[in-house]
Image (cartoon, helix red, strand yellow):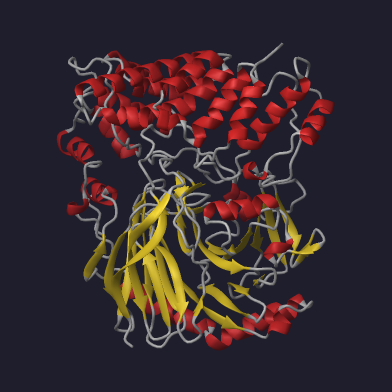
Amino acid sequence: MATSVRRTTLSLPAAAVGPDNPLPALAGPRDVHRVTVPEDAGVPADMARQLAYRPLDSLLPVHRRDGYGRDRTRTDLDALVIENDRLRATVLPGLGGRVHSLHHKPTGRELLYRNPVFQPADFALNGAWFSGGIEWNIGATGHTTLSCAPVHAARVPAPDGGEMLRLWEWERLRDLPFQVDLWLPDGSDFLYVGVRIQNLHHHTVPVYWWSNIAVPEDAVTRVLAPADEAWHFGYERTLRRVPVPESGGADRTYPLRSEYPADYFYEIAPGDRPWIASLDAEGHGLVHTSTDTLRGRKLFLWGAGRAGRHWQEWLTEPGTPGYAEIQAGLARTQLEHVPLEGGAEFAWLEAYGPLAADPETVHGADWSAARGEVADRLEAVLPRADVAAAYAAWRPYADLEPKERLATGSGWGALEVARAGYDLPGTPFTEDTLGEEQRPWLELLRTGDLPDRQPAGHPDRPGAPGVPGTSLVAPPWRDLLESARPSPSSDYHLGVAQWHAGDRVQAVRSWERALAHGRSCWPLYCLAVAEAAAGETARAAQRYAEAVACAGEAGKQAAKQADTETDEVRRTVLPALAREAVPALIAADRADDAATVLARLHPADRARGRFRLLAAQVLLAQGDAPGARAVFDEGFEVADLREGDETLSDTWYAIAERLVAGDGPVTDEVRARARAAHPLPERYEYRMRPARLHGSRAGSHPYERRTE
């Protein structure tokens, strides 16, 4: 059959992504990938430079996505299929362009781990992420902010005369356009993927890219790569060089022979062909290779421990097979960012396809022979020279105009084109993609002034804060805000842009000016974050309390006036404020005020797992350890539990220690007795590293009332 690109629908049990968190993401990302490199680690000079090169310190201008739950209903998802007589790839343009499935027709094998459900979880840099398939990760260390966001898609002529599927978007953390071109040459067993990232600016930009491939795993799945060493990164946040395949007494190329989740970044010698494969007991599976620009290769494993298994169930559903991830990136490790000079680009070609190798050799004790067997089989079915030739054939097609648009992404690229006049024929960000989020900024661009949302500080609606929408923080937009007429909106957004630029003093002044226009929860929230960052715990708590009170008043007023726009405050802003205000009030020894904040919430919000956890922490801080324990005994699920977050276990053990200690001090002996008497229930076990005792002194636990 001729290669084709077509629309279809994929039906899955799916949890709704829900609304974005409306508050600006002023705090730095909660990154579990912070790293400590031992002095004797022998890190190469180029890696050391890139480990320290401009790590992400803010999610701005992106908002957090934490509005999802865990209730799933059968849902139709838009999908695109690219197919020849050998392979069928199914792509989800509304979910970051994820390749959901790669089916090999002659053998009937699914080459990827195909998640049977769509369940967001807090793994992306900005929150919502889901597992399975092939994910295109751009931005900064971690899963892309586009994980659950739409991208543009279109048909494009392919180098062999057929059709390609092009995906493209504007990545907002680094302000860069990128494209992903997928095509299947007639009769090919390999999916070719051409990727390009362009730096349209005059300055150098840090770039991050990893293609993450979820593959099925079982006890005899082996991951192979052309390396004898790897860089190990675990959730203890250290980076160290280890031998491959065996380290720590086990063969780590079998994902289920580790207990805890971990990354293994393979050290591939310069000049060697880059590839990685996951093969089953019969020597069958998926292989990935590329041109040399994509130099890094990695294995991520969940491990066989209780927490790793629980996380896998959390991301899918009980009873489904497990998976590991094999990955390919621009750098040796995912902890690095690579400089891309102004006006330059990164481009490369990837290939994904089936591989069959001799199982006895693949699973034999001779590692050199095992990886040599895979390398030979790969060269036989897809010579390295053919990949280079495919890349050369693709490059002239990267700028071809799309023939037919198949899906529409965001309007942020169109806004940047309107501002700077970029000419991007291959990835057109057209004016018709501009939406409501971009319109205030388009008006700023055209008139020099940013419009105010009607409810913000309006005399007929005292206290109603409105929802100011997304802030833009790049230097050109900050310059426009600085020249705009002072107003509640322009002062607020200018403060956010100044905060992002590191000018915190001016940011605070801008938010204070915004507050002078009329009481609003938005500048109050920003000032609370600023006070907390400055170590002013008591003042931050007071600002948070004022912001919650302001939003609560607006919600009551909206209900009285049947004002659906301002009612968004009650539905989204008040819960978002509460989840940050409650810990701040506890830290300031204002547990009773924290309880009052929770009481302001709608009962449906208070019933959510995140707020049940906060309720337990408030009760513990009020000295009611039995009441806090009762919350856990009733059971709850925190839908947006962060990857690597140990809040559940920390709170459980803090409660257990207080139950054992009574009114006495919490000593190491008490901690040990608490763990023996109150083991952590499996439903709350998400620790991705070995358990440890609390090192805090008596009375200093963040969720416990201080008794000193």
- Foreground of the two, 255 or 75: 75
Q: From this viewpoint, is residue 501 visible?
A: no
500 sits to left or right of 416: right
Query: Where is residue 345 shown, x and y percent of the image?
Result: 40, 61
- Residue drawn at the location 24% of the way across and 56% of the way down: 429
Q: Residue at x 62, y 34 (%)?
A: 633
Say which residue appears at 57% left-offset and 45% top-offset: 643
Question: Going by the picture, which residue comes out furthest to the right?
Answer: 669
365 to 560, vertically: above or below = below
The residue at 62%/70% (across/down) is 270
627 or 486, which lies in front?
A: 627
Residue 273, horizontal then vertical, whole percent: 59, 75
Q: Is residue 153 left or right of residue 199?
A: left
In the shown orientation, is residue 316 left or right of residue 496? Answer: right
> Along the line of sight, which residue is nearer the eye, 613 or 687?
613
In which quadrant is the N terminus drawn? bottom left
